[in-house]
Image (spheres, helix red, strand yellow):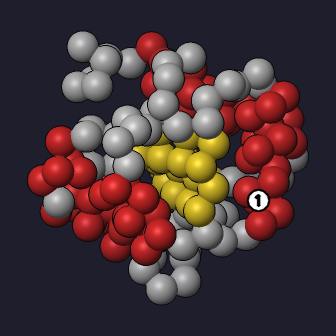
Amino acid sequence: MKSGPIIVIDNDVDDQEVFEDVLKSLGVSNELVLLDNCNDALNYLKTTADQPFVIFCDVNMPGLSGIEFKRRIDDDQQLRRKSIPFVFYSTSVDQKTVNEAYTQMTVQGFFQKKNSIEAIKNAIRLILDYWSECKHPNTI
């Protein structure tokens, strides 16, 4: 697994705890940064010297939505240059939002939250394995 924190932005504490438990069960040793709103996430990204490994973000967030958060990352040259893999991981998935994510911003994945721990583990393992192997500006 590549280094750098894994950032999870989700206002559901239960979903955050499940994510944390799944990472532990998968043996992932990366630091986990849990944030419950996109404004704090944006501030974190602008002020951290760390190069995050991947961002998992819920779409439906209070205040600044996940979609608007990703737009702000794409519009900020400093953040855009960090080339942080960004994945939407959300309960609600609809055609309009998925289309918007892929055609109007630089999203690398859109996944619907699963209902069982085993399905959640499989999805997260798949995403993390992919980004561990994938070549992008932060790995060359």
Residue of label 1? 15
Residue at image point 54% right, 72% down: 37
Residue 103 visible within the image: no
Along the horizontal axis of the image, is 2 left or right of 10?
left
Along the horizontal axis of the image, is 2 left or right of 17?
left
The foreground one among 18 and 110 is 18
Q: How crowded is mark 1: few (under 14 residues within 10 Å), some or many (20 or more)?
A: some
In the rendered view of the protein, which quadrant contains the N terminus? top right
The foreground one among 58 and 80 is 80
Which percent across, then down, holds residue 115?
A: 82, 53
Which percent across, then down, holds residue 114?
A: 75, 50
Q: Which residue lies furthest to the bottom in this view?
A: 63
Number of marks drawn = 1
The secondary structure type at the circle numbered 1 is helix
Residue at image point 81% right, 54% down: 17
Along the horizontal axis of the image, is 25 left or right of 106?
right
- Three-letter code for the amino acid on which mark 1 is drawn: Asp
- Residue 100 lies, with reference to residue 26, above or below; the image says below
